[in-house]
Every structure is written in C-alpha cells, then in structure tokens.
Amino acid sequence: MTHPQNPHARRTLSTTATRWTSALSAVALLAVGGCATHHDSAEQGNGAHPTASLDDHPTTGAGPVQVPPLTAPQPAGTGVDVVYEVISDASTLPSVTFVDGNSAMQQQAPTTAPWTKKFVNNSTYVILGLSAQTNGNTVTCRISVDGQIIDEKTATGKYALVICAAPS
C-alpha cells in the first residue's frame, strides 16, 4: 500500500522487512549452530560418545576394522537318534527320498530293499520325512526317534508310493 504523501513508503517498508527477515535468519542459524556445538561438547565432557552414522567406519592405524562373520550357536545337547526304514515285497526300490540330519532333502535311486538310514539330528526343531516307491505291490516306511516309532505307513498296489513324516 502506498502512502499518498510518500510514494516511496512501500519500497522502504519492503526493504525494512527484508532486513529484519535476514537478521532473524542469521540469529536463528547462530543459535542452532551454537546449540549443536554446545550439545556435542557437553556429551564429550560427560564421557558420552557422539552418535555414529552408517557412513562412519571405525578405523585403526592400519585401515578399517575387520568384523568377524556371524556364526550360528552350537546346538545344546546330544540330539536325537533317527532311524528311517523302508520294507517292500520287491528287492529294489526305484527311489527313496528323505530329510537328513541337516534338514536337507536327499534321494537314493535306485536302491535295494529293505533300506535303512540312521543318523543323529541336533536341530532345535527336528523335521523328519521319508518317501519310497516300490516296483512290487507293497511298501512300508517307518520313522523312529530315540527308539520310539513315531510314524509308520503302508501302501499297496502296483508301483505303490508311501510317505512318512513327523515333526518332533
């Protein structure tokens, strides 16, 4: 808004507002910078460590510190004794598939019947599974843990397929 007696009043008001804005900005920057500096020195004076960012790399005189890889904890206890068995009326089995002591799938093909696999499983949660197919007419699978039968199944028919499974 211009003043009728002073046509330059608007320019003066605008210039004065700009000066005040600049002055307040400078004071704000100094205050924030001073607080940040005061905050960091206060932490160091109290024995606290400054916060590290993800970009910070701890170093020694010889370069970056090498961090050893993570290792899984060793299993506690002695594990469980597992026995897988497959019995068939045929002398050969086209395939036997099973979960081993490391929870990995394994397959033996072809193999002879009767078939047995023994191992110790040290897993925290034991997963057991066994399947077999026969060239004959009957096939039985059995899973035992620490001497106890926990699953047993029989399948009949030409080229029968049987599956046993048991979480412990």
Image (tube, helix red, strand yellow):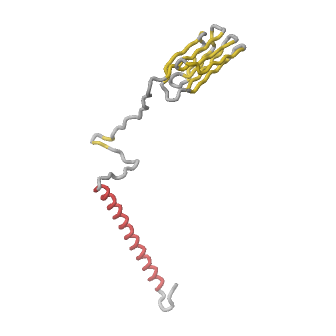
Front residue of 21/118: it is 118
Q: Against 58, is 116 above or below?
A: above
Q: Residue furthest right?
A: 157
Describe residue 41's horizontal placement relative to residue 135 as left or right.
left
Q: Residue at x 39, y 69 (%)?
A: 28
Residue 39 occupies quadrant: bottom left
Q: Indicate the quadrant where residue 114 lies.
A: top right
Could you say which is closer to the camera, residue 59 or residue 144?
A: 144
Quadrant of the image containing the C terminus? top right
Q: In this view of the protein, which residue sits in the foreground, 13 or 58?
A: 58
Question: How many callouts does the rendering have?
Answer: 0
Residue 85, relative to residue 46: is it above or below? above
Give the farthest residue toward the bottom: 5
Q: Residue 53: x, y in percent?
A: 39, 50
Residue furthest out toward the front: 148
x 35%, y 45%: residue: 57
Asked if residue 122 lies left or right of residue 108, the reply is left
* Relative image position of residue 29 (x, y in whole percent): 38, 67
Image spot of residue 157 (x, y percent): 72, 14
| Residue 115, image x, y percentages | 58, 12
103, 40: nearer the viewer: 103
Residue under the point 58% across and 19% down: 149
Classify residue 131 by image quadrant. Answer: top right
127 left or right of 21?
right
Image vertical order of residue 141 relative to residue 1, above or below: above
